[in-house]
Image (cartoon, rainbow, N blue to C red):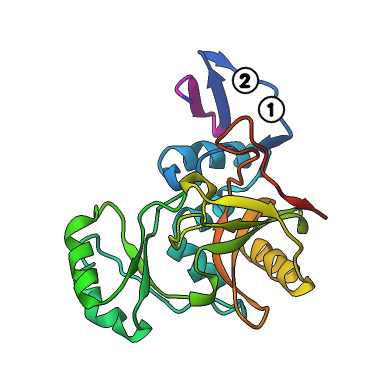
């Protein structure tokens, strides 16, 4: 976006590219910004500018912000009857150690995630308080972490649900291949086509609607009784595998 200049001239919004004033704008803009790296003062500023100029963005800036931070996502979903694992977090960057005692009510083992992590990175399963204390010295404190109740029955597996325009268009069961908790394909996990219950579809659509998303990937954790917890929401759903020769095996609907 280095060649783009956002302008307000004579009280009106405008856009210049390579020094030239843009006079015709697209009606629809499909946003492909890696969500975890979105910067409010740069990327979102450009997207807001386009939206205010009348462009229809997919997804809108606020919807993207709802997914930038994993705890922000849960803040949006809370109070809507969405099943969420109990989760704690904090405001200051250096408060991780102070949370060790506070989060103990979630019981061990406990899931610990960087709120801006992506592709399964900066995610840990803390065995006990001593493990948490060790983590506090090892992790980068560039963003707050969240502490979350461990859903044992979904260890190493989840369901990625693709929602477009308020409708489920595909699902994929993701499974770890090395025993780790994360099932991300980027960490060596495998994906396979799977069916999804009507309850699961309705939950994914509900989450999409609450977050204001046009296109998204919703990750669901599975419970023994066939119901689900919402794990995460992704505003920048990948269209292809990291391996260009490997297609993602989504079951179409």
Q: Residue at x 55, y 50 (%)?
A: 64
Q: Residue at x 63, y 47 (%)?
A: 59
| Magenta-drawn segment | 2-12
Quadrant in which residue 50 is drawn: top right
- Is residue 155 shown in magenta? no
Residue 153 higher or lower than 213, as above or below: below
Distance between mark 1 and mark 2 Cα atoms = 7 Å
Q: Residue at x 35, y 76 (%)?
A: 109
Q: Dot 1 lies on which element?
A: loop
Residue 150 relative to residue 56: left or right: left
- The C terminus is located in which quarter? bottom right
- Seen from the viewer's position, the closer of residues 53 and 80 is 80
Q: Report x, y in % for residue 226.
A: 68, 78
Q: Residues within 10 Å of mark 1 (few under 14, many from 20)?
A: few
Task: Please say if the residues under marks 1 and 2 sit with CB atoms less than 8 Å apart.
Answer: yes
Residue 107 relative to residue 158: left or right: left
Tell me the residue that label 2 is attached to: 22
Tell me the residue that label 1 is attached to: 25
Outermost residue on the right side: it is 253
Which is the main secondary structure of the residues drawn in magenta? strand
């Amino acid at each position: 976006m280095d060649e783009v200049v956002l302008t307000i001239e004579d009280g009106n919004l405008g856009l210049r590219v390579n020094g030239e004033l843009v006079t015709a704008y697209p009606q629809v803009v499909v946003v492909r910004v890696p969500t975890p790296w979105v910067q409010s003062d740069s990327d979102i500023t450009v997207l807001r500018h386009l939206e205010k100029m009348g462009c229809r963005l997919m997804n809108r800036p606020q919807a993207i912000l709802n997914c930038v931070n994993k705890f922000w996502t849960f803040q949006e979903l809370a109070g809507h009857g969405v099943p969420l694992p109990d989760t704690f977090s904090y405001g200051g960057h250096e408060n991780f150690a102070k949370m060790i005692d506070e989060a103990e009510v979630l019981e061990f083992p406990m899931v610990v995630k960087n709120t801006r992590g992506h592709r399964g990175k900066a995610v840990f399963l803390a065995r006990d308080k001593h493990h948490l204390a060790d983590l506090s010295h090892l992790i980068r404190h560039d963003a707050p972490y969240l502490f979350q109740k461990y859903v044992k029955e979904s260890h190493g597996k989840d369901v990625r649900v693709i929602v477009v325009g308020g409708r489920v268009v595909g699902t994929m069961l993701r499974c770890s291949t090395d025993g780790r908790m994360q099932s991300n394909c980027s960490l060596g996990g495998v994906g396979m086509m799977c069916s999804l219950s009507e309850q699961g579809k309705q939950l994914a659509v509900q989450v999409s609607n609450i977050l204001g998303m046009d296109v998204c990937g919703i990750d669901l954790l599975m419970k023994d009784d066939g119901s689900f917890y919402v794990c995460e929401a992704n505003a920048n759903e990948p269209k292809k595998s990291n391996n260009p020769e490997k297609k993602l095996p989504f079951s179409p609907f």
